Each structure stands twice: as C-alpha cells, then as structure tokens.
Amino acid sequence: MLDLAFVKTALTRNPARGIALGELRPAAVLVPLFIRDGEDHLLFTRRTELMKHHRGEISFPGGGRHAEDADLLQTALRETEEEMGIRPADITVLGQLDDFVSIAGYRVTPFVGAFPYPYSCRVNAAEIAEVIEAPLSVLRDPAIWRKENWRHRGRVHPVHFYTVAGHEIWGLTAAILRQFLKRIGYI
C-alpha cells in the first residue's frame, strides 16, 4: 500500500513541466487515488456516447477551465465533483504532473489526489457511462501496456495503451497514467 506522504514526495522530487498556453485552451484532470481492501486503486471514467468530445473513451475526471476557476487545480476539483460527486474538501491533493497537449487543442494539467474509500459518489450519468476502479498492482504489469506510433497532422506521435479488465485506456489518459506510475517508481 502506498504511503500518501511518499507519493507527495515523489511528485515534488520531479517538478511538473509546464507548456506555454499559446493557442491551446487550458484544461485539468485529477488522477484520483484511493485504497480499497488494503490495495491502491486509481479511478477512471468512461464517457457517455452523448459527449461532444472523446465519446466512449476512458479518462480521468476533468475538463476545460471556466472563467470563474481560480486556477487549474480548482478546475480539476470542480470537474471531479461535477462528474463523480467527490467534494473538493474530501480530496487530499498530492501533487502535479507535467502538462500534456491533447489532439483537441487543450493544454491539460494533471493533478494527483487521494480520496477516502468507501465514498458515496454521485455519478453524473449525462457525462459518465461507467466508473472503472483499477488496482495499481494491475496497472504496473508491463504485459498490459504497449506503445504505437501514430501519424497525426504530418507528424508521428507515440500513443500509449493499457488494456485493463477488457477496457482500453489509451492516448492522453494512458500517457498521464504512465507518467504517474514512473514518478512513483512503479515502472
């Protein structure tokens, strides 16, 4: 089982690298960590087919920054509450990962936070089709990870994939997951 102080120290030891916003739109996600039955887990969501962007994809809770958000951490916490019903006051923020650029034109800033389990989530059914709880012991297994090179807008980009319990976690979410696992020394 991970010690939350260890995670916080590991994330602080590698300061997050930012990306200039430029023409990109600001967004943030939360990498939600919790302990169930003595084992560390991450929470993922599968977006509904009704969503405008990334229909049916597996992601971390998050979204675009609103004008009233004081900062990107508030964006991540607000979106987590909107999507999962997890109150910001119930999340212990442990740190930040590097910024990522999405193919949809967002600069995504990931934050890592822990919440207590069990938790009475209120899932927003208009946005979330399924909640996926994945043990870190499974996510660190190299047999479930692969990388492919994809061509997009004339450039080749590495695309990460994790296959977990019949679910394909890929793209930006998989890249964020991979960085998190590296930062805490799990891969």
Image (cartoon, rainbow, N blue to C red):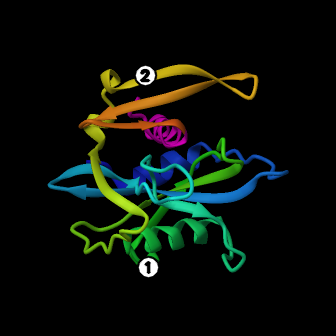
Q: Which mark is residue 89?
A: 1
Residue at image position (25%, 57%) is 35
CA gap, disc 2 and disc 1 = 36 Å
Which three-letter amino acid code belongs to the residue tagged 2? Arg
Disc 2 target residue: 146
Q: Give the farthest residue toward the front.
A: 50
Give the magenta-colored segment's residue range: 172-187
- SS for dot 2: strand
Residue at image position (44%, 60%) is 113
Q: Residues within 10 Å of mark 2 (few under 14, many from 20)?
A: few
Q: Position of residue 83 (x, y in %)?
A: 43, 68
Q: Quadrant of residue 87?
A: bottom left
Q: Residues within 10 Å of mark 1 (few under 14, many from 20)?
A: few
Q: Earlier in the sequence, mark 2 or mark 1?
A: 1
Front in this rendered view, residue 94 or 129: 129
Front in this rendered view, residue 33 or 1: 33
Query: Is residue 128 located in the magenta-colored stretch of the structure?
Result: no
Residue 54 relative to residue 91: left or right: right
Q: Which mark is residue 186?
A: none
Q: What is the magenta segment's predominant secondary structure?
A: helix
* Quarter of the figure that contains the C terminus: top left
Q: Is residue 123 above or below residue 180?
A: below
Q: Position of residue 67 (x, y in %)?
A: 72, 76
Which three-letter amino acid code belongs to the residue tagged 1? Ala
Q: Position of residue 22 (x, y in %)?
A: 85, 51
Q: Is residue 64 above or below residue 167?
A: below
- SS for dot 1: helix
Q: Is residue 95 above or below residue 87?
A: above
Residue at image position (46%, 74%) is 82
In this figure, what is the number of numbered marks? 2
Query: Is residue 178 located in the magenta-colored stretch of the structure?
Result: yes
